[in-house]
């Protein structure tokens, strides 16, 4: 999808841009769209979820991250915009009459056939186990554990490179530069996710963010010491601590990853600084 610049030269739209969205369709069954509940707001007068609130009513699209319909061929019916993620989605109609939404990879077109399974072809949109995918192939929507559903590589323009296979694991290079081991029995989908121009969108004005449910974030140094660890001081003062911290006193820079995570042993090489 192309990046569109606004022609208006007002202060708010002079530098603003947007992504061209696919046309709306009504082909999807009602069961694939569920009203998304809002998780922001206040409890007993106190804000329970910071920096959220006031967004438009939104429907959640039920995405098939598991790709469990093995050996059943499907046809791409439509490419649609999803307000809940930065990548577009594709509506698939399978030969048995079932409809599913999947994440739309780059170069996937309406009318193409896709399939998941052991005998699936190495083609964009097809899903199969990592043991059946050639080394050097770029994949997305990768499972961390077999049967759990895709958890790695689900945002716009993302692609993971299959670097090597040595039973029982395969080595994947993530966009961050991290190299991680994943079980060979885990499912992955071929191709790079589309809508990579999304990262270049300039919103232009605060109102567009408010419609998305994103409220302003106030700097910690501008708050009082009771509200934030960086607060207090006379006039314009800095953090006032050795290292920046969150509102709750936890480190905000440097190595912030929790220690003792079970998946640490699966990381071959850490991401670049």
Image (spheres, grey):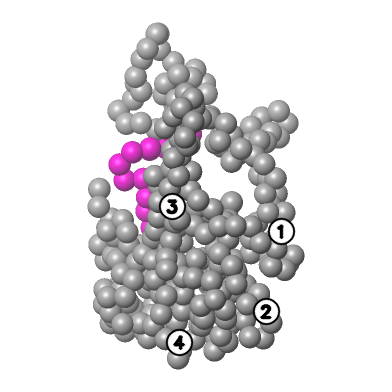
Question: Which of pointers 4 and 1 lies earlier in the amino acid sequence?
Answer: 1
Q: Which residue is found at the position 68% from the left and 67% from the top?
A: 28
Residue where numbered disc 4 is placed: 120
Residue where numbered disc 3 is placed: 2
The image quadrant that residue 102 belongs to is bottom right
Residue where numbered disc 1 is placed: 34
Q: Which numbered disc, 3 or 2, marks the residue closer to the eye?
A: 3
Question: Which of pointers 3 and 2 lies earlier in the amino acid sequence?
Answer: 3
Q: CA distance from mark 3 to mark 1?
A: 29 Å
Q: Which residue is found at the position 63% from the left and 77% from the top?
A: 93
> Is 164 on the left or on the right of 248, as rendered?
left
Residue 247 lies in the magenta stretch: yes
> Is 35 on the left or on the right of 85, as rendered?
right
Does 86 sit above or below residue 246? below
The image quadrant that residue 42 belongs to is top right
Q: x, y (%) of residue 196?
A: 40, 55
Q: CA distance from mark 4 to mark 3?
A: 31 Å
Point out the residue furthest to the bottom here: 119
Of helix, strand and loop, which one carries label 1? strand
Of helix, strand and loop, which one carries label 2? loop
Overall secondary structure of the magenta section: loop
Residue closer to the observer: 197 or 43: 197
Residue where numbered disc 2 is placed: 98
């Amino acid at each position: 999808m192309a990046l569109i610049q606004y022609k208006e030269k007002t202060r708010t739209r002079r530098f603003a841009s947007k992504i061209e969205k696919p046309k709306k369709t009504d082909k999807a069954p009602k069961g694939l769209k569920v009203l998304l509940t809002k998780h922001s707001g206040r409890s007993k007068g106190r804000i329970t979820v910071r920096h959220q609130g006031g967004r438009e009513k939104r429907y959640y699209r039920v995405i098939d991250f598991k790709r469990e319909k093995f050996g059943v061929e499907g046809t791409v019916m439509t490419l649609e915009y999803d307000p809940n993620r930065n990548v577009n989605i594709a509506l698939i109609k399978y030969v048995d009459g079932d409809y599913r939404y999947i994440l739309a990879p780059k170069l996937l077109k309406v009318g193409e056939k896709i399939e998941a399974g052991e005998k699936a072809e190495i083609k964009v949109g097809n899903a199969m186990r990592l043991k059946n995918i050639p080394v050097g192939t770029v994949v997305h929507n990768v499972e961390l554990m077999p049967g759990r559903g895709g958890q790695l590589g689900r945002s716009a323009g993302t692609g993971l490179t299959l670097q090597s296979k040595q039973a029982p694991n395969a080595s994947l290079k993530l966009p961050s530069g991290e190299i991680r081991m994943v079980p060979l029995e885990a499912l992955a989908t071929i191709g790079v996710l589309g809508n990579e121009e999304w990262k270049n969108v300039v919103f232009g004005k605060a109102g567009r963010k408010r419609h998305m449910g994103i409220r302003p974030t106030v700097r910690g140094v501008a708050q009082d010491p009771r509200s934030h660890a960086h607060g207090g001081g006379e006039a314009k003062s800095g953090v006032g601590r050795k290292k920046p911290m969150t509102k709750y006193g936890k480190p905000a820079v440097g190595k912030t990853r929790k220690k003792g995570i079970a998946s640490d042993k699966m990381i071959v090489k850490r991401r670049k600084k």
